[in-house]
Amino acid sequence: MAVAGGRSTKRLQRGTLSRGLIVGTALRILDEDGPDALTFQRLGKELSSSATAVYRYFASRDHIMVAVADELDRISLEGYEPHESWAESLRDLATRAWNTALDHPAAAALCMGRVTRGVHELRAVDAVLEAFHRGGWRGRAAVLHYQAFSNFILAVASNNAWRLVNQRFGAEVNWVQEYQPADPDAYPYAEAAKEHLRSIDMTDVFHRQTDLLLAALEAEAATLPHD
């Protein structure tokens, strides 16, 4: 039986509902309608099922978000292969995380960087640690660099995701750096840069941040003993 908008009101056949289907639907809801739209009732409606059926797979909205976070890791890692250069591997992993947050800003804003203990998170951890190992870091130093790198990339990506969510779904947010002081001569550097401040592309900023981080890591790596 069809309804307006093309969705079917027919219930799923018994056994059709699955964790993967629920997670994929949750991600689509977040993409289309933002963070506040994801409820058990909405999931039941979209799945032509019931909220109670969804509860059999996930005890809470928070449990769903953990699963969505691991799905973001899966999306980011799809097709990834280590590069010959460990630094280019890190750049690739960083860019993949950024692009995933651009494609799924509501999900990224809510849960990118959460600890999921899922298989795809483990794959991401291992990929970053492999790059640092090949760069010459070992033991605690490798873990320290992995954590610093990951925290930085995920924080920057999720912060930009929040900006995109606020911009798209109507919340008031002052994300454009636009200044009109009464006395522009008192702030000569901001005045000279004002057109660039108001129009800078955040993806360009991200790539520059990544360049700076990798340059610092490469300089340190050059001083390390290698096996």
Image: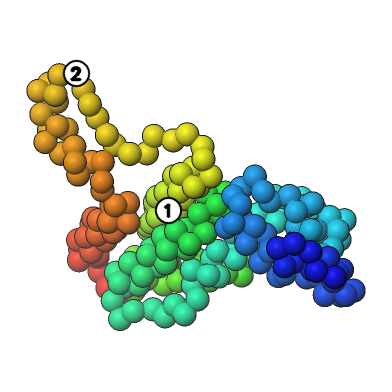
Q: Quadrant of residue 143?
A: bottom left
Residue 136's x, y, as percent?
A: 31, 69
Identify residue for label 1.
157
For the N terminus, give its image quadrant: bottom right
The kind of residue on which mark 1 rests is Ala
Single out the residue that lies furthest toward the top: 182
The amino acid at mark 2 is Ala
Gap between marks 1 and 2 measured at Cα: 34 Å
- Is 79 displayed left or right of 47 in the figure? left
Residue 136's disc is: none
For the residue carrying disc 2, how many other residues have a C-alpha within 10 Å: few (<14), some (14-19), or many (20+)? few
Residue shown at 46% from the left, 44% from the top: 167
Rendered residue at 65%/54% (across/down): 65
The x and y percentages for residue 9 are 83, 65
Comparing 163 with 88, the one in front is 163
Which structural element holds mark 2?
loop
Q: Nearer the viewer, residue 7 or 162?
A: 7
Residue drawn 75% across the image and 53% down it: 42
Could you say which quadrant of the image residue 13 lies in? bottom right
Question: Where residue 199 sits in the image (x, y, percent)?
Answer: 25, 46
| Figure check: 30 above or below 199 | below
Quadrant in the picture for residue 10: bottom right
